[in-house]
Image: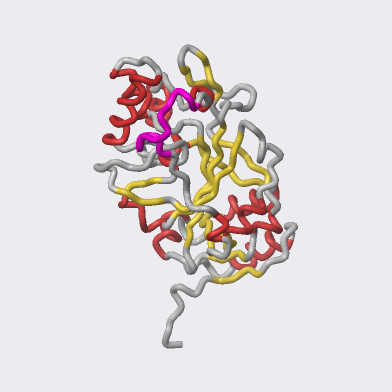
Amino acid sequence: MEEHTDRIEDHDHIFQPERHDNIGDFDLEKPERENWCPNDINEDDDDTLWKYMDLSKLYTILEDEYLWFNHVTNFDDPYEGVYSEKTAKKIAEMHVDWFDLSEEEALKKAKAGNLSSYVNCWTNSPHQSVALWEKFVEGNKGVAIKTRASNLRAAITDKRRGTDYISFRFGKVEYTDYEETMPRGISAPVYHKRNSFDYEKEYRVVISNYLQSATEGAPTITSDGVEWPYDPGLEISIDVNELVESVYISPTADSYFPDVVGDIVDNSKIDVEVIQSDLFDDPMQ
């Protein structure tokens, strides 16, 4: 966490959309004016999504009815939310002219990528993943929520959705070689990851917090001499009935564990099937 906090403090410039409102300042015919967006969720409505977690997280989701969106700097991967080196240099060349910055300042701004976003992650796959059970679940007390892309979109009830300053975007992460150039646009840095992560098959909901509005007492990022509030994460209200299609139990869970999960689900607002994963069942029996 300390490493990523330093990353925020090191950037004097943060993405500020209002500085881009005057489209007349830019030549829309130039290829640099790319505005990459993730795939449209309407094309993926029936895609199956999974979220692997420990039991306490499932309880929190069902009891408190929210999803946690992490700020892009709070992930283990230091490349989260940033552009590749080659892409940052290309953007910096434009910033020198557009914002009357020095080359050093322009590169610093470009490398910052997107620091205004908060992310909630899922796995886009028709089946379970042994690798992800092991990565996201500690020990044998894990569960997974299974849903569909259309359900995830419909489940978000947060009153800030659709406002002028906070937008929600849905789509698949694209995996790329960070030694090469990559697409540009506010969504591009948070919807691209290095090829070494492609086994995750990640699907994301991303909040772009355009005015960096944050809760009282939140830490700040200094940008152009102005202090911007920054939350480590956001709690986003959901309809759990809309979200959860079924709950799966870790394939290595002890015999008592299904009853514990079943009690939590039974005492919640949802009425869904609790399924014991059979990934490690003996195929000869």
Looking at the image, is 42 positioned above or below residue 93? below
Q: Position of residue 205 (x, y in %)?
A: 54, 47
Furthest-bottom residue in this view: 285
Residue at the outermost top position: 225
Magenta span: 23-34
Q: Residue at x 31, y 24 (%)?
A: 107
Residue at the (68%, 44%) spot, across then down: 237
The quadrant where residue 1 appears:
top left
Give the left or right position of residue 106, taking residue 227 as reference: left
* Relative height, residue 69 to residue 155 (above, below): above
Looking at the image, which residue is at 63% across and 68% down?
A: 274
Instruction: Check the image and report above or below for 29 versus 12.
Output: below
Viewer-closest of 4 and 110: 110
Where does residue 53 sit, x and y in percent of width and height? 53, 54
Q: Quadrant of residue 283?
A: bottom left
Q: Is residue 23 left or right of residue 90?
A: right
Of residue 27 and residue 227, the one placed in the foreground of this image is 27
Q: Is residue 44 visible?
A: yes
State the image coordinates of residue 32 (x, y, percent, origin top left): 36, 34
What's the image's color scheme?
secondary structure
Residue at position x 29%, y 43% from top? 178
The answer to whether one can see residue 260 in this image is: no
